[in-house]
């Protein structure tokens, strides 16, 4: 049985233990869908020559290490094509003079050019980087930035400038300086890890030594909420994103699961079974609970619209015993009605509302394999995000709305992958031998 299907069935099993009714598993069904439209933004040929020292002697190892981080970030955005270094080795030295031979760079196919300079403090503990971005085609200076910090912040400084370059192209800040949290198996259950957008800096956050589920990153970036079985009940836990502080948030008997932060960070929607059924509630900052769903079938997996006015969720209330995606009002819940948005498959789960509010990504069972699909709220059309071998599940959006991360499973192996919306290829982000599941993308870090 696929892991995603098992996760939804776990809600049924838990409910069965509490309520005394048997689970009704979903069955595979063939589906017809269309591919997402191709990416319309043109790629930019960008040159990132070797960084030069502002003063003093050169540190070639430092220069190449940091330059490579910046160039790799730009490449991962999939809108920039770094020009091969050997093509401009004869002219890159002239950028040190401050006078650019735009014609020479243009002949090499370079459209944008980055000039990078660095300086180490006498102690070697602090570093300064100065960046300048040039538009070679239009022969103009676009952007200049200066960063200063300790050695441990060098990667962050490269990520920050890559994000600034991305914003120059698209009008949206890039996501190189964001992170993703995810779960990985252990002999005792699962633990939580974090990783940078480029796949570096994998760090373990938790020491639960138990089963944990469904992490969700807070909008202010300070906390992650998740469900833990450490005390032999599925309790709601709040964890600082550096792993330094863990505190129980809700420990009601029965299910306390599937938490999702509201966009303003003042509320958490979640699933509780305290009233003899699996229902969706909202928990506010004063720990007051408001019930949103009142149905005898299973309701789970809530996700907020960016304006906080609506919630998409999973339910088998259609009467078929097979989960589908619905939308309800964020305050009145299902008392004022719900709108079903999935019809083409017998199993749909894990809705994730896009940051722009116009799309909902979700997991769908297609010919016995899970794929990520997309519902477009304006046109009410459904498109496919992923196809091909392996099961892809549990989508989460990047804060710019340009990428989706998800869990991919092939056989017994699972890992987190990232795909640009509208793109053709995906990138494996995690490589832990114990696998990777349940990704949640961080918000933008504060500048």
Image (cartoon, rainbow, N blue to C red):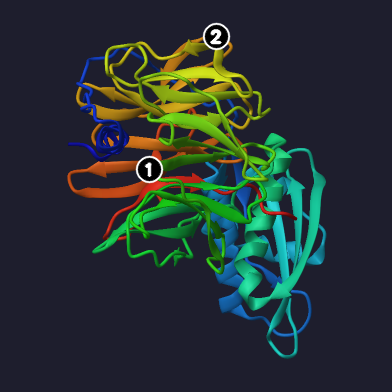
Crowding at dot 2, Cα within 10 Å, few <14 / some 14-19 / many 20+, comes out as few
Q: Residue at x 22, y 37 (%)?
A: 2
First in residue order: circle 2 vs circle 1: 1
Direction from residue 83 to residue 321 in the image, left or right: left
Q: Where in the figure is residue 325, as x and y percent of width and height? A: 42, 20
Residue furthest bottom in the image: 123
Q: Where in the figure is residue 68, as x and y percent of width and height? A: 55, 63
Q: Residue at x 26, y 42 (%)?
A: 409
Q: Residue at x 26, y 33 (%)?
A: 16
Q: Nearer the viewer, residue 414 or 227?
A: 227
User: What residue does disc 1 label?
Assistant: 254
Q: Nearer the viewer, residue 425 or 305?
A: 305
Q: Are marks 2 and 1 in contact (CB under 8 Å)?
A: no
Distance CA(mark 2)–CA(mark 1)? 40 Å
Residue 294: in sight, yes or no? yes
The numbered disc on residue 379 is 2
Q: Residue at x 54, y 61 (%)?
A: 247
Q: Where in the figure is residue 91, as x and y percent of width and height? A: 66, 60
The quadrant in which residue 123 appears is: bottom right
Image quarter (top left, top right, bottom left or bottom right) of the N terminus: top left
Q: Quick check: 270 above or below 215?
A: above
Q: Where in the figure is residue 406, as x and y percent of width and height? A: 40, 40
> How many numbered marks appear?
2
Q: Secondary structure at mark 1?
A: loop
């Amino acid at each position: 049985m696929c892991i995603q299907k098992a996760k939804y069935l776990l809600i049924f099993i838990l409910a069965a233990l509490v309520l005394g009714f048997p689970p009704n598993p979903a069955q595979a069904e063939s589906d017809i869908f269309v591919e997402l439209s191709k990416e319309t933004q043109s790629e930019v040929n960008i040159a990132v020559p070797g960084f030069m020292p502002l003063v003093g002697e050169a540190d070639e190892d430092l220069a190449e290490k940091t330059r490579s981080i910046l160039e790799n970030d730009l490449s991962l955005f999939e809108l920039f094509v770094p020009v091969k270094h050997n093509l401009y080795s004869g002219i890159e030295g002239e950028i040190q003079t401050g006078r650019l031979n735009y014609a020479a760079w243009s002949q090499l196919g370079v459209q944008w050019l980055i000039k990078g300079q660095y300086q180490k403090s006498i102690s070697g503990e602090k570093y300064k980087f100065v960046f300048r971005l040039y538009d070679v085609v239009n022969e103009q200076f676009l952007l200049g930035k200066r960063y200063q910090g300790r050695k441990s912040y060098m990667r962050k400084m490269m990520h920050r400038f890559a994000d600034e370059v991305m914003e120059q192209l698209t009008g949206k800040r890039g996501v190189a300086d964001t992170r993703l949290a995810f779960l990985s198996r252990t002999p005792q259950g699962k633990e939580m890890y974090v990783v940078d957008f480029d796949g570096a800096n994998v760090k373990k956050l938790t020491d639960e030594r138990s089963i944990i589920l469904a992490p969700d990153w807070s909008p202010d970036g300070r906390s992650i909420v998740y469900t833990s079985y450490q005390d032999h009940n599925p309790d709601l836990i709040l964890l600082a994103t550096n792993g330094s502080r863990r505190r129980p948030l809700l420990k009601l008997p029965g299910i306390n699961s599937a938490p999702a932060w509201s966009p303003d960070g003042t509320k958490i929607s979640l699933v509780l079974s305290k009233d003899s059924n699996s229902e969706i509630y909202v928990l506010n900052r004063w720990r007051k609970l408001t019930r949103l769903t009142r149905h005898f079938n299973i309701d789970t997996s809530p996700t907020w619209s960016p304006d906080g006015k609506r919630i998409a969720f999973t339910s088998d209330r259609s009467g078929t015993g097979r989960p589908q995606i619905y939308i309800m009002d964020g305050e009145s819940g299902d008392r004022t009605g719900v709108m079903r948005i999935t019809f083409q498959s017998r199993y749909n789960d894990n809705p994730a509302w896009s940051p722009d509010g116009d799309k909902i990504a979700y997991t769908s069972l297609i010919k016995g394999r899970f794929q990520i699909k997309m519902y477009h709220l304006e046109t009410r059309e459904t498109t496919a995000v992923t196809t091909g071998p392996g099961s892809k599940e549990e989508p989460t959006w990047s804060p710019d709305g340009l990428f989706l991360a998800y869990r991919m499973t092939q056989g017994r192996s699972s890992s987190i992958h990232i795909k640009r919306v509208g793109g053709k290829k995906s990138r494996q982000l995690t490589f832990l031998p114990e696998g990777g599941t349940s990704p949640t993308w961080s918000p933008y870090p504060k500048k």
